[in-house]
Image (cartoon, grey):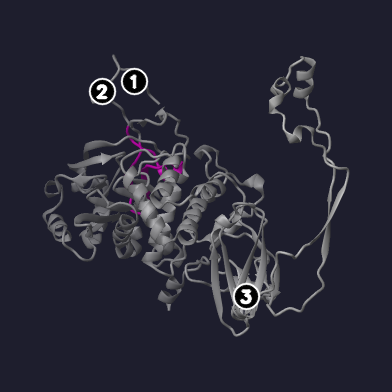
Amino acid sequence: MMRIDLPKSLASKAKTKFVVKWHYKMINRTMYGGRGGYEYFPEDGNYLFTMTQWYPRLCVYSDFHGWQNKQFTGRGEFALAFGNFKVKMTVPSDHLVCSTGECQNYQQVLTPAQFGRWQKAQTATEPLEIGLLADAIEAEKSGAQGAAAQKTKTYIFKADSVRDFAWGSSRKYCWDAMPVNVEGKKVMCMSFYGKEAYGLYRKYSTKVVAHTIKTYSKYTIPYPYPVAQSIEAANGMEYPMICFNFGRTEKDGTYTEGTKNGMILVIIHEVGHNFFPMIINSDERQWSWLDEGLNTFVQFLTEQEFDSNYPSQRGPAHKMTDYMRLPKSQLEPIMTNSENIIGFGPNAYGKPATALNILRETVMGRELFDFAFKQYCTRWAFKHPEPADFFRTMEDASAVDLDWFWRGWFYDIEPVDIAIDTVKAYTVTKGNKYPVLFDTLYTFPKQKEFEFITQLRNKQAGLTSLVDKDTTLRDFYYHYKPKEITKDVKNRFEDIEPISDTALAKYDNKFIYEIRFKNKGGLVSPLIIEFNYTDGSSDVERIGAYVWRKNEYEVTKTFMKNKKVASIILDPMRETCDINERNNGWNVKAEPSKFDLFKAKAAKTRGQSTGDNPMQKAKGK
């Protein structure tokens, strides 16, 4: 961290200028780790450069807490100010450069053929290859000793209203692009990748970028920048208008389904970071979830709109139960500082995404949630929101009181475990007449009030009350003393009238069920109850979480049904993140045997990779 003391305080609307000279030594990031540097390919003797976190950046000065100058330790990422950039990169002339912002001189730095393809890409409906695979392979063969590598060219990029700047350069790059329309504005979606990723990136990357920009724009705000890019670099990290992802094939061009789905996931996630926190500029130094959690939630929506069978691992409530049932010593609230989180993945990514999906699908409903969420994104675009701004906006825009939800999901670690405790079944029939029972009521004398310390000390101090000074304030009860014991006999049913035949008729052929629910986990939740009837039909009733507001531990509800109930299941769609489904049923069939569980575990489902490569095996036949 470096501090600059100005000669005098900077007034509102005033400007100051300073110049920083620095140097940056690139490291082998595959050897030492880190976000940026270079990767060396010994097979062809070439490099792939990813230039990230490479220049001095300005801390945020906010209305909330002044300078955000927490040190960067690698976990809590960036709190950065917005600025305008114009950057020139001088590189070997056989390199292609990808960067934050728009290139200002493609016609000067690209070959005529490349520039012609770039112009055609402006109106393409499919990703159009600008930097060809054949050209990249030829440049690789020539390497740093080739004639083109001995010369240089200078790319110029311009980016406005961005909080960071990253770029990449390599002679290994292939490059494709296509536009996507966002509310009448063209956004160029592009991908850069080496031959090692060609089999996956050429088919998927740019289309996934375009899909992500369109979907996020629908749920948040229209994408304001002119470019969005995915760069294959064997890792994942985000910057404005550009992100670095993984997704390489085997040497024969085949890949596993797990590799493909993982690549799609990371592209959606990192491109989505353009919105959180690159535009809705939350403070990840302090709160990882306000960036990663919100992004993971919209990532989940985008995955499902990409492929309805996509195996999303974060977002669906039932995917979070394993974490929520951990011992409390291994849990911490979502509202935990970035550097202090133990389970970083589930706490900063998975649990917030799950909470927001429950809020959308189960608590608020899609229409109300989507409106409020879009309001948050609109209000806080290009600003620095804190958690309270998100909570407040969701409630303000929806007119829904969500205090209980923020408390339980974000400030606490208690899980959802709602149980069906007892079920009582009734039918209503015309009753017989019974003898009237009488109650004997007793009145006992009023006990002498206990003299507490203030009364005793007032007496010791000789204080005289107003009632003793002014006897006109004394009334009947000042002298009244009840009798020792009084007795009265009363008909307990004297105010109850028999129900009429007409009123009784509406209960004919009805079945009444009184269900007592217990909150064993601690986190209140809506009650979603499935009634399965003896005729094979079923229906679902939903009761909001406010049913717990007077008693968070136990609640009883009565239901009247037209048909006889065969069984009852709580949370049938597994949408509340209930950690114990064994107590969610009444009169349900027995649990599956260990053999059934083994078969279910052994069954292969779409999106799960067992480590083998069926594509490779099929290719070998």
Q: Is residue 462 among what the camera can see? A: yes
Q: Secondary structure at mark 2?
A: loop
Tell me how far mark 3 sits from mark 1, CA to CA.
Answer: 65 Å
The range drawn in magenta is 26-55
Using the image as rendered, state which of residue 466 and residue 165 is in the foreground: 466
Residue of label 2: 18
Q: Which mark is residue 4?
A: 1
Q: Secondary structure at mark 1?
A: loop
Q: Locate the N terminus and report the quarter of the image it occupies.
A: top left
At x 27% / y 51%, what residue is drawn? 223
Q: Position of residue 273 (x, y in %)?
A: 36, 49
Q: Name the residue type under label 2.
A: Phe
At x 35% / y 58%, what residue is drawn? 196
Residue of label 3: 599
Instruction: Tell me whether circle 1 and circle 2 mark residues in contact (CB < 8 Å).
Output: yes
Using the image as rendered, state which of residue 65 and residue 37 is in the foreground: 65
Q: Position of residue 574 (x, y in %)?
A: 56, 65
In magenta segment, residue 525: no
Residue 82 as seen in the image, left or right of residue 308: left
Q: Secondary structure at mark 3?
A: helix
